[in-house]
Image: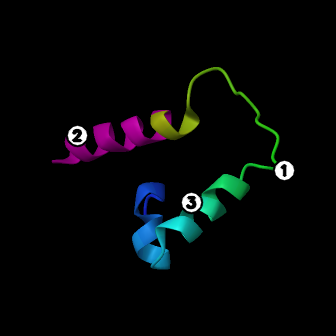
Amino acid sequence: MPAPDEWGQAFGDEVLATAILDRLPHHCEVVSINGNSYRLKNRLQAIKRDTDVA
């Protein structure tokens, strides 16, 4: 999956990519989540586990 700034290349049209990216959050509700990231916590544990094995 390309990063959003590369979507113009993926779609072959910068204007189309901009329109799609503009409309994605149009009907969305933004939910702000505060606190520690479980994804980051799990990633750091995996890195520690990998370095402990090596």
Q: CA distance from mark 3 to mark 1?
A: 16 Å
SS at badge 2: helix
Q: CA distance from mark 2 to mark 1?
A: 46 Å
Above or below, comparing residue 34 to residue 49 in the picture: above
Q: Magenta: predominant secondary structure element?
A: helix
The magenta stretch spans residue 43: yes
Q: Nearer the viewer, residue 42 or 13?
A: 13
Mark 2 is on which residue type? Asp
Question: Which label lies toward us, 2 or 1?
Answer: 1
The magenta stretch spans residue 16: no
**Dot 2: within a 10 Å radius of its alpha carbon, few (fewer than 14), some, or many (20 or more) residues?**
few
Mark 1 is on which residue type? His
Residue, far left = 54
Above or below, comparing residue 44 to residue 1 in the picture: above
**Dot 1: within a 10 Å radius of its alpha carbon, few (fewer than 14), some, or many (20 or more) residues?**
few
Q: Are marks 2 and 1 in contact (CB under 8 Å)?
A: no
Residue at figure coordinates x 84%, y 50% from the top left: 27
Residue at figure coordinates x 64%, y 64% from the top left: 20
Question: Which x, y percent locates residue 50?
Answer: 26, 47
Among the 4 quarters of the image, the one containing residue 23: bottom right
Question: Which residue position holds label 3?
Answer: 18
- Among numbered discs 3 and 1, the one appearing first in the sequence: 3
Question: Which residue position holds label 2?
Answer: 52
Which disc is residue 27 wearing? Answer: 1
Q: CA distance from mark 3 to mark 2?
A: 45 Å
Question: Which label lies toward us, 3 or 2?
Answer: 3
Question: Which x, y percent locates residue 54?
Answer: 15, 48
Would you say 16 lies left or right of 22 here? left
- Among numbered discs 3 and 2, the one appearing first in the sequence: 3
Q: Are marks 3 and 2 in contact (CB under 8 Å)?
A: no
Q: Which residues are magenta?
A: 41-54
Mark 3 is on which residue type? Thr
